[in-house]
Image (tube, grey):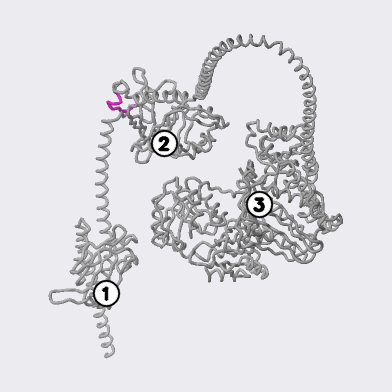
Amino acid sequence: MENKTDDLSVALQQMQTNLKKVSEEHTERTWLQTGKNNLNEKLSSVKTLLELSKEIIDFLVSYTSAQIGTVYVFEDDALHLQHSYGINGKITSSFRMGEGLVGQAAVGKSLNILHQLPENYFKIESSLGKEKPDIIAILPAVFNNQTMAVIELGKFGDFSPMQYNLLKEISEPIAISINAVVAKKNLENLVSQLKSKEKELNNQISAINRSSATIEFDLNGIILSVNEIFLNLLGYTENEIVGKHHSLFVEKSHAASKEYRQFWDNLRKGEFQQEEFKRIHKNGESVWFLGSYNPILDESGKPIKILKIATNVTLAKKQQVEIDAITTAIYKSNLIIEFDLNGIILKVNDNFLDIMGYKESEIIGKHHSIFVEKGYETSIEYTEFWNNLKKGMYQMGEFKRISKSGETVWIKGNYNPIFDEQGNTYKILKFSTDVTLVTKQAYNLALQAEELQTQQEELKQMNEELEQMNEELEEQAQNLKQQQEELQMSNEELEEQTQSLEEQTKSLEEKNKEVEASKYDIEQKTKQLEISSKYKSEFLANMSHELRTPLNSLLILSKDLSENRNKNLDEDQVESAEIIYKSGHDLLILINEVLDLSKIEAGKMSVNVERVSLRNFTDELLRNFKHQAEQKGLKLTSKLNAALPESIRTDLQRLNQILKNLLSNAIKFTENGSVNLSIDRYTQSKVIISVTDTGIGIQEDKQIDIFEAFQQADGGTSRKYGGTGLGLSISRELANLLGAEIKLSSKLNEGSTFSIIIPLEIHPEQESLRTNTLEEEVLYKPHSNIHQDENDTKYLNYPSIQDDRDTITKDDKVVLIVEDDLKFASVLLKQANKKGFKCLAAATGEDSLLLATKYKPQAIILDMELPGINGHKVLLELKTNPSIRHIPVHIISANERSLEPIKEGAIEYLMKPVNKNDLEEAFNRIENFISRKMKNLLIIEDNENARKAMRKLIGNGDVKCLEAGTGKDALALYQENKIDCIILDIGLPDMTGFDLIYKLEGLKDQDIPPIIIYTGKELTKEENNELQKYAESIIIKGVKSEERLLDETALFLHRTISNLPESKQMIINNLYDKEAVFHSKKILLVDDDMRNVFALSKILKERGMEIIKAENGKNALEMLDKHADIDMVLMDIMMPEMDGYEAIKRIRLQIKHKNLPVIALTAKAMNDDKQKCIEAGANDYIAKPVDVERLLSLMRVWLGK
């Protein structure tokens, strides 16, 4: 019984607990529901965000017993404070998403509770005091996964579980209400904007109707409505055209045309049409409209009708037609040409081209100075002429101009400055007429008038003289009459004397005949001497030709064989070829000595006087003979007197020839001892240069004979020592030519001293004029693509910004900005200045190359789209110029990013637009690159010897070589170091080169550095194409592969070539083929000697040239007609049927060959041969036997023009 009572008691307690729990849950649900209902009631009655926020925070503070609260609503990408409760101090007005606890709660989208707040946290204040809250609840209001607001509540004590549940359940209703209010607000703003737009549109339509002709059509061209302006312009009433087709206003032929149908098809497609339209008035007259046909679209974007808006331009059209007619008449009757303010030709009409003989493409972009006489373009008068035009001053008169053919053309006309709207001159328009014929006639008339006046003055003078003579004759007649009487008296005496005189006359006549006979004999001997001299000259020239022609082939072919390029000759054969070449060369020296002697004797040897440094002259001579003296064990010394002048004025070439002969003889005839070269004062106006040896000496009775041609001290020495015996004879004659003399002092078996006594200044009458058509200085002057003076950095034809060039010092860090957008260039300049850089600015590629060459900046920022030459060409010029190719180039361009500039040597490529952070990082990279003096090169090669060879080839103190034998090691080194360039062999033991590249790409966020593939593997087409995507260069191991590897690494590591060892500089410089100008050139070789043709053809073909052969001048002309694309002619002079002179003259008579380069080849060696060739029309001349290097050098010059 007791147990049952206990069970009942337990059951009752359990039931009581359950009832209490149910009651509490009911109370909680009721409290929750009541709170939600009350909140919803408040939310549903408000209209603005501010009201809504106030209701929310007031309710929650009251219902949860909180003391403080805030509401932040999400608008315009941030949370903005809308309302606060119980807060007196200043609080943050807004938070970005993720910023602070409020921003973090918005991102997290869940209730956040904060306990144990810090002492400096916001205080809850009352009139009695202030204290920090115990707890903070941060509630995000979320709807459709979007945070609409964040509510923050603070209180003393803790929130109850029931209050926590309330906060969680009201999040979405609050968010929905806020979303609705925001949407309503946005809708109201949109409606307001639409009303404003509608009002604006109505005003615009009203304005159009008041000022323009308007008409509406349906899509088939039927007129729907029209305004009064349109009706008035075409003479119709509204009833006459509404409902009619648009074709009512066009010509019948046009209405039936395909063009008209296409016009309406385009409108029906919704295409806008705007231009000038010709329409027909009701009375049949033409009316011109300028306007547009505007398709009106429905809500789905489909056309529903066409609205035309137009203005009447009939009067303007008529005026334009008249202006065009006048302009056409002016252009047809005048010579017209336009220039910019710098004199650059912009436009030209056909009349001007016909008169001057040019094509339009030949002069557009050229300067006006091509029409004026050479030298006039640099005159003060010509400069002033253009300065006046730039100032807007009108110029009128007769002007002398030069046509393309070189003829003088007289033009009468005006140079008219053209002004822009601000009154500034911006171009020059010249109207003129050809008055050449009139000017020539006026000039001839003036000459005739001058001659006539001269004749009249002479006649007048003659008349005066005749009158005087008449008076004298009359007086003489009187005297004669008187004398006649006296003569008559003395006739008898005279008759006697006459008989005596006749006898004397006969004797004189006999003597005169004897004198005449002697004179005739002298004249005949003189003529015979002249003929003999001519025959001698002809003989020398012809013998020179006959000797040099076969010698030419012998030297060229033996030299080619001795080089053994094809490696198909053994050592004996190579030695034989070298002996043949040396023998031929010795024979050439002999021929030249004979000819030199003949020229001197004939008085045809001229001198070229220049300043000669005695010290430099002596040093050069000793260098030339040092090796020869050392081979014989002789001591070679020099001595210069301290009192000597620094230099003398003489012919260096002739003096050199004399001293070389004396030194050569001294060494040749000296077996032991020494040879000394000394220079001393001889007199106040002369110096003495002596060559003293301890050789065999010369007998006293032979010391005069040795200066005669073909004479030596002893016939026996000819066999022992060799030589022609001409050297001293030539030296003596050359000394005479220089106003000097040679003296000899010698003792047999003791030695000799040869001295030349030479004046300090050569006499002016001995100087000769140089008549070279193409001076050596011009022939070998280095070519440059940049025409302006590199020092003239003010030459900027294109506008640029103000930069720092005037304040740059040698210690400054300089960056060159190449950008034609002046605003962006200014941004770059300011950013660079902030980073401590001085800046140079260029707006064109041409100017950038000038500035880079002069200043050699530490870095270049380059745009790819530039006026003039574009960025690609600038980059190519930079990277092929050894002096500036090391400068890092950073591309910033609007063009799509491309690997090509990187492969060409650029360090990075940024695409526009770029923001401030991008520029900041770019300049950081520039600064970092400049500051790092050591560059890291990663060599990935499994062969240790190959790695060692590469390290030795590339290393120079400025490059640190990191080595890896496997792909795994390479990846580790790449991750541990900043790598600037990679050399990769694709055959690795643990992975392929392709796999390694793919892994490298995935390792870092930044671009991988330049990769050079250096492999001995023959690549398939697919492998090559795949590697091209990633590698900047692919080098297959083989001939010149090491040289290419050195060059490519120098390019991508931005190494300064001049800082490399000389041997490595030479390797890189040799890579750039100076003979590229020869490739694929077609050369016409004209020579009747097939040996020469064969020899020269072989040499030229080896350099990539195509050879066309002709055996005489006539055949050459036929070949030129047959092959219009010939690039150069090599023309022999002495040939049968038609010689070279005649052939060259006929070539120059053909306009199409006027500029064809012609180089004359001749074995004649007389002094005037070159002048004859140039006068015939040759561009240049070279004597046989041909010096191949000299010929190739000439060909480079003329093929490069």
**Nearest to viewer (mark 2 / mark 1):** 2
Closer to the camera in the image, 1106 or 713: 713
Residue underneath mark 2: 427
- The answer to which image quadrant residue 94 occupies is bottom left
**Residue type highlighted by circle 3:** Leu
**Residue type highlighted by circle 2:** Lys
Residue underneath mark 3: 652
Residue underneath mark 1: 161
Relative image position of residue 1037 (x, y in whole percent): 68, 60
- In 3D space, how far apart are the residues under numbered discs 3 and 2 (Cα atoms)? 54 Å
**Residue type highlighted by circle 1:** Pro
Closer to the camera in the image, 1140 or 201: 1140
Is residue 268 placed above or below 921 in the rendered structure?
above
Residue at the bottom extreme of this rendering:
2
- The range drawn in magenta is 223-231
Closer to the camera in the image, 578 or 524: 524
Q: Residue at x 30, y 69 (%)?
A: 101
